[in-house]
Image (cartoon, coloured by chain):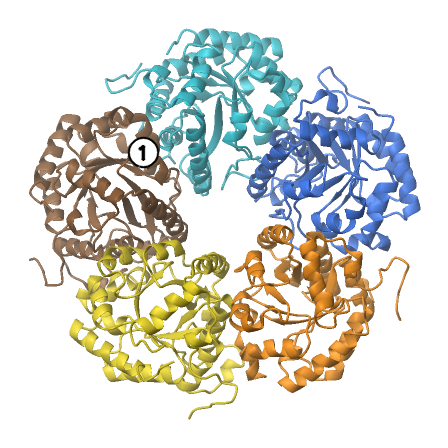
Chain colours: A orange, B blue, C cyan, D brown, E yellow
């Protein structure tokens, strides 16, 4: 039930099709072709949930509270990169610097206050990323939050530093705030599709998105009336991200490995450059997490870009 | 039913009548006489709707979601310039740098939150524009918003950078916010006339405005009691912009080509320097868009400045 | 019915009595003795009403919408200076640079939002004033506004730049905001007297004030119980401004030339250094405006300082 | 009825007991031993009431509206220093620079808005103080205001500049805002005692406080239940200021000279370094003000530090 | 009733296991092995309660109002370090510089306003710490406050300065604000566990926490349903702090020395690096405070790291 058209772009833009400054190209090359599947796809292991959600995220798998777990998984599971904030990067990655690329996440917040006016302040800089030998930085933009101006402005400074220092920029494009909730919620196609486009207009190199759910009554038109299946929704947001490479997040943990793999295949079929799965990986025991990581990597190997 | 008077200025100020710093003159010359109609008028293709309104703006013409569409249209349609934010400019214009002038739009926002306290943060800089070889920058000022001080202050920094770097400054002068809604709305002659003057007092080189609609009961006097036709209203806002060149926006798409051309003729007759039509152009299929663009260009050719 | 006392200072402080840095002295000399009445008094033509009130201010005299009108009036009417924002100064004064001194107004706002929390952001700098050859800068302080801290802080930076660059500083000291309205309003002696003192304590060189109206029931004591005539009120605010030179504003237009002249005489008799009349001048036809300007100038000539 | 204990410090810390950077020592020496009583006590004449309260403060003694009055009083009355904002300091002290030390007050506000969220913005800098040859700067901290963070942060920058430039720092430690009012008000022992400690922890060299009034029902424990006489209250706040020298303010004018002198004696007996009396001095006719100043100075001479 | 598992880390990370920049290593070495127990544990005497709570905290032991008391106690009691703000550090520690390490506390606030939107502004800098020869800086982060973005952003600048200058960073990780109160309060395991993780993700070297109390009905799951004893709760927050060294605070004074010692033993048994006890020490008479300090130090001596 694919709805392809001539105008629909193919799979994600490969490095070969992008014209880039030398430093950014070198770093992106390492992410896309130097580590992980090394075929132009990306398999990123993120770990900022301790800050964003609190330690309760680790309760299902207590060893994962110790970041050594995720670092070992990233190394032995063959990931393209690990995404960490400065505290974890400095304390756990130092002895493995260079072995696995680092995406330094620059901003973050707790979830103690609700997200009605969510804003995510930076506590690290692009220069920190250079100092630590990172190959990219990450920055969350709360698309549509009443305080989105704070992030867009700070993002602008981050982007200029990235330009100056040749650092790729990964945007966590997260619809958030009371207004998006009033328009159907953060997870809808409307919300994710808009977020994808925002990332492109703001100048991201890579965007992290969530798989969109169907819109319902509260969503604005024309989304409210769209009747698209999962694949069509995914292709749509990939298209809306344009030349920005799309990573889909895994969200809450799924116990069924096969379901995870089906998701990966679906995302890649729909044009994603890769996946950024955290809890779906590191909430499994190490051996299972590694086994699943290897299978995901094997899948990605079939989607050269 | 023209109401001309001795005091009414003629058509828009040409470059010949302006005393300018060398860098700004060089760039304005390229916009006015080096590209597009090349006779002192301007025909600008803007694309920031994906950020400002979301991808739904592209639904009527899916290929337009891919910015290559607009770049090709700007090139082959003979536009004076294309107006893009940094994300689109870097990813889609690089291979055509120099072929069509770039107006780098510096600020923007989503429309997820309503506009009661609208504010548009910058995420790119005048130095970015220089780096990309742009011939102007664009900046939105939400005239009358409760938070207008944020933009006027940031605008001041942009203006100084423009002065320092010889960069022309195009102001999107948009009445916005709960107070203008309480006074008749953003589209009235009162609102647009005020916005035109604000752009002049703030030091814009070029201002983008909307064709004003008649004032009604909520507008302040003396506007409320004015009974002017479309042409008189347009002439009035052009006069209020003084020596700032005025571009009129097309707003939502009109299906009737002839109606679009009538609008262009009307705007130019009333003293506008040109038009900045986005959706009215790139929501048409490429061949129709090019055809209409050529006709608009032909029209502008009859209004040398 | 004058109420003089030994303690009441005489007319406004002349340049001879002030100890000034060389650059500031040079510029003040040009304002006081190099142009206009050239006898130590000041006759300033201000034009920021298009930004502050919108183009409707020009409806009674449409030619005044074109700033060339005010520039011509300032030149031919023999004014001490013209006060303009950067947009008008750059576009209309360039060809006459040096012929009439410029007071570059640095901040401003629209009146679309009400003034309950008025704040006036700067969009030009003291360095802009230097670059344009201005002889002073102007800055509005909304005395008593709930957001007065924003202006006082920005004012502090402007003042330091003035000190560094030898630029005289004219403060538009405007009581404004919901609190002053609750205490009798912006125009009362209480409000204007306070504003005069604020200008002195903040370090203005020249202050623009309005002629105070009598206090009524809402004003704080001891003002509420004062029963002073217009002259006593004017003398009081001039005294409260101390060594800061006082210019009185004309406010809304008066059709009666003789009334305007009586006002000027009254202000100068009460110790003012001069007047800053905008609408009372440029809302008259050019020949009448010039005639009235010449009569005001003649009057000022009788008040050497 | 003194309640002394071993733990109660003696009189205020003299310069001999403080280890100071050379520049700060030089300036403090001039204040403490070079002018005024010149025995380690301080007698400061402040004048910022025109800004803080408006010109109505001068109504009881109109000549005091002219700052020449206070300057003459400071000079001829033998004060340790005069405390002025930059406007008054530049306009009235220039001809007497060096004759009487200047404490340049850096921040201030009007009392038009109420003090529920009081905040005092700086409009002058420590570098201004150096330029003017001042021997200290003054900065108001509104202890406990909902916006106290704004001042504490700005204070931090002022403090660092003071450190860098060797400038003593006098803190006007004023409890203020809706929360302190809900806890008994700004004048209580609770409030003043807290303010004294805040000044010490923030790093003031000298603190200006008010004589505390007894706490009542709204004050927090243990203050609510304290039953201390005026002397015990004063000693307590002096102790809470630690090694910060304490100046007590005079507050509203007292007509009885003997009462003023009794206050001075009480303050010095209780360990204060001196007094900062404004309205109690300059609201008297010059001859009376000088006579009272001489008597205060005579009193202070009996408290060498 | 210990609940150990393979995944539970052992006692706190020693300096030997951390890879550190030379300056930070040198300073941490002084704290951990050069002073106090000198075996890798920490015993810190904090004094910021005068600012945070007011002088009433000293009422039970009036001599402690004079900071000389705490300085003498830190010196003679054999502490690893004393934690002071800049005012106290400059005025009381100068004559003992080098004898006991200083942790310069950079930010703070009063408790006059309630903590619903608590925010703690910095009034000193990392450069101040270097100038004073401090061996660490302290910074409070109000985890979960509606204004937490202000601190996280300022913290980011402090952290970068620490990196640049080789200064260890101690975070007072304090859950605070209306949202944490709505979720069970600042003292629960949920709150303290989250705070511990935040400190690690933000990049602290050392974190100060409170001993957690059990969660109750308002706490989020899974904490609400946890039934862990005091030791299990402590071990949990130590684990959540990862490689960040944990100091537990003493909170309000306990009169029973044995109870204090039991607390210390419990904390060290559970993996803490040490304790930061203020009121429990300096609210005792000097001889008792020294005796208790010696006993605590003796206890710590049995936990080499």
Image coordinates for residue D250, horizontal then vertical, percent: 20, 42
Camera-side residue: E251 or A114?
E251
Can residue E233 be seen in this snapshot? yes
Residue at 52% in and 60% down: A123
Q: In the rendered image of this protein, does residue B194 appear above or below residue E130?
A: above
The mark tally for this picture is: 1
- In this picture, is B151 found above or below C223? below
Instruction: Measuring from the top left, give residue C26's x and y in whole percent.
Output: 43, 18
Query: Mark 1: few, some, or many residues within 10 Å (few <14, many ≥20)?
Result: many
Q: Is residue E81 left or right of residue B248?
A: left
In which quadrant of the rendered view does residue B239 lie?
Answer: top right
Name the image quarter holding residue C262: top left
Residue E51 versus residue D185: which sits nearer the camera?
A: E51
- Quadrant the N terminus of chain C occupies: top left
Report the residue that reaches farthest toward the front. Answer: E22
Residue at 28 percent across and 17 percent down: it is C3
Please tell me whether mark 1 sits on a helix, a strand or a loop: helix
The chain to which mark 1 is attached is D
Would residue C256 appear left or right of B53 to someone viewing this image? left
Residue at the image position 8 percent from the left and 40 percent from the top: D301
Quarter occupied by the C terminus of chain C: top left
In the rendered image, residue D23, in percent from the top left (x then y), is placed at: 26, 42
Task: List the residue tagged with mark 1.
Answer: D50
Location of residue E222 with respect to D47 vertically, above or below: below
Q: Is residue A212 visible?
A: no
In the picture, measured across the screen, residue A280 lies left or right of residue D38, that is right
Q: Position of residue D277 (x, y in %)?
A: 20, 39
Q: Nearer the viewer, residue C92 or A129?
A: A129
Residue at screen point 85% across, 46% down = B72
């Amino acid at each position: 039930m694919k709805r392809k058209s001539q105008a629909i772009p193919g799979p994600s833009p490969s490095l070969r099709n992008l014209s880039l400054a030398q430093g950014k190209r070198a770093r992106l090359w390492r992410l896309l072709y130097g580590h992980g599947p090394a075929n132009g796809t990306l398999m990123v292991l993120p770990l900022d949930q301790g800050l964003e959600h609190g330690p309760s995220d680790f309760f299902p798998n207590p060893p994962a509270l110790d970041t050594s777990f995720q670092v070992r998984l990233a190394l032995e599971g063959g990931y393209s990169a690990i995404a960490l904030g400065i505290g974890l990067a400095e304390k756990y990655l130092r002895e493995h610097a260079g072995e696995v690329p680092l995406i330094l996440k620059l901003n973050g917040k707790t979830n103690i206050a609700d997200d009605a006016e969510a804003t995510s302040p930076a506590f690290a800089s692009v220069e920190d990323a250079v100092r630590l030998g990172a190959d990219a930085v990450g920055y969350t933009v709360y698309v549509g939050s009443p305080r989105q101006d704070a992030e867009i402005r700070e993002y602008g400074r981050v982007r200029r530093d990235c330009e100056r220092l040749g650092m790729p920029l990964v945007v966590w494009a997260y619809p958030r705030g009371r207004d998006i909730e009033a328009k159907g919620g953060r997870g809808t196609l409307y919300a994710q599709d808009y977020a994808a486009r925002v990332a492109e207009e703001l100048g991201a190199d890579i965007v992290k998105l969530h798989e969109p759910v169907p819109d319902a009554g509260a969503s604005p038109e024309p989304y409210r009336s769209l009747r698209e299946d999962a694949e069509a929704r995914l292709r749509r947001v990939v298209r809306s991200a344009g030349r920005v490479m799309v990573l889909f997040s895994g969200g809450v943990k799924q116990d069924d490995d096969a379901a995870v793999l089906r998701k990966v295949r679906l995302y890649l079929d729909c044009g994603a450059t890769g996946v950024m799965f955290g809890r779906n990986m590191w909430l499994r025991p190490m051996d299972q997490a590694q086994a699943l990581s290897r299978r995901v990597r094997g899948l990605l190997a079939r989607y050269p870009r």
